[in-house]
């Protein structure tokens, strides 16, 4: 008999079967995932609402209850229009149409009505809800109460408008980003026409005005910087500008704030 080689004598290695996942484990994992998401939504301090594409409320978390005053039992099944401010009703068809097209609505500021009838300012983020086939079947809304921020902003604006001195904010590029009514009176130009234009355009010496705001950005501030504002009717106002840069929370310069004191004799 012919001798068999070592290779022939070796027994072939048996192939090990790959472990197959138990479909039940996948279903359990998906179920746990859904339960986790439901728990997150339920415990969120943000008001999270689910609704059909026609606007019927289907889910309502604890945050929504605290914000709007309705319990889940009271509100589920009702139209979303129950909490929409009367003068904001025309917004809903537009928002729902965008959702039907698959769009997301981010940080949309509007007003809603609480159960006690009081109005609240909110910021909305609305996203489409899709079924397993990718069809849009509803919308998820996350709302945050911004009433206090709105009130603070209104208060700050009231203080600015109460000043008899022309006040202005300017971008690093020298463009006007905001003004008060006193600036409108000093130039004779409406606020909407002032914003976005070059600050230096409204002075008898534009180059000197440009050098002034450039000095602020270079050094951080200026005091009693003399300029003359030219009204659109030709009248002149001699002023002393005090200005300083303002920054974001990380210290980056966003622009400058300037106040003009009228010293016209």
Image (cartoon, grey):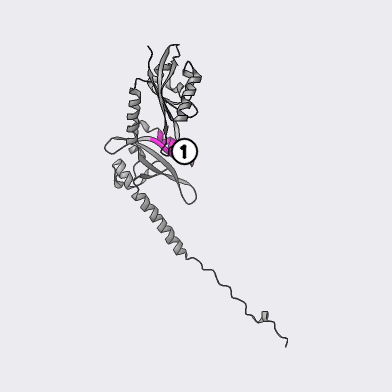
Q: Is residue 198 visible?
A: no
- Residue 206's spot in the image, x, y percent? 50, 19
The answer to whether 91 is drawn above or below residue 49 in the figure is above
Q: Please, is residue 149 above or below residue 196 in the view?
A: below
The residue that appears at 37% across and 51% down in the rendered structure is 40
Q: Which of 155 and 230 lies nearest the eye of the viewer?
A: 230
Q: Residue at x 46, y 25 (%)?
A: 213
Q: Quadrant of residue 31?
A: bottom left
**Of 40 and 51, the residue lying toward us:** 40
Residue 2 in magenta? no
**Which stretch is magenta?**
91-109
Q: Classify mark 1: helix, strand or loop.
A: helix
Residue located farthest toward the right when viewing the structure as drawn: 2
Front-most of 179 and 126?
179
| Quadrant holding the N terminus | bottom right
User: Image point 47% across, 26% down: which residue?
Assistant: 215
Q: Is residue 123 visible in the rendered structure shown here?
A: yes
Residue sitting farthest toward the bottom: 1
In the shown orientation, is residue 30 left or right of residue 71? right
User: In the displayed structure, would residue 160 be above or below residue 15?
Assistant: above
Kindly give the residue lying farthest to the left in the view shown.
116
Q: How many marks?
A: 1
Q: On the rendered image, what quadrant is the C terminus found in?
A: top left
Give how far across and how far down residue 185 sits, in percent.
39, 17
Q: Quadrant of residue 116?
A: top left
| Residue holding disc 1 | 98
């Amino acid at each position: 008999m012919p001798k068999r080689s070592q290779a022939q004598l070796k027994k072939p290695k048996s192939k090990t079967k790959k472990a197959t996942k138990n479909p039940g484990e996948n279903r359990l994992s998906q179920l746990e995932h859904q339960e986790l998401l439901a728990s997150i939504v339920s415990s969120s301090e943000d008001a999270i609402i689910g609704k059909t594409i026609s606007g019927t409320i289907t889910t309502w978390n604890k945050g929504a209850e605290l914000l709007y005053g309705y319990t889940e039992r009271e509100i589920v099944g009702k139209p979303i229009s129950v909490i929409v401010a009367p003068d904001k009703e025309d917004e809903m068809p537009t928002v729902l149409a965008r959702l039907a097209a698959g769009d997301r609505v981010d940080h949309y500021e509007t007003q809603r009505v609480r159960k006690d009838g009081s109005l609240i300012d909110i910021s909305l983020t609305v996203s489409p809800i899709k079924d397993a086939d990718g069809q849009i079947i509803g919308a998820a809304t996350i709302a945050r109460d911004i009433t206090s921020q709105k009130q603070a902003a209104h208060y700050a604006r009231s203080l600015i408008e109460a000043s008899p001195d022309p006040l202005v904010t300017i971008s690093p590029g020298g463009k006007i980003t905001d003004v008060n009514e006193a600036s409108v009176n000093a130039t004779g130009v409406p606020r909407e026409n002032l914003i976005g234009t070059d600050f230096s355009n409204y002075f008898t010496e534009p180059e000197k005005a440009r050098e002034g705001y450039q000095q602020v950005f270079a050094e951080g501030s200026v005091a009693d910087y003399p300029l003359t504002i030219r009204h659109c009717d030709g009248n002149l106002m001699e002023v002393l500008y005090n200005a300083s840069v303002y920054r974001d929370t990380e210290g980056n310069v966003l622009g400058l704030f300037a106040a003009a004191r009228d010293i016209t004799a």
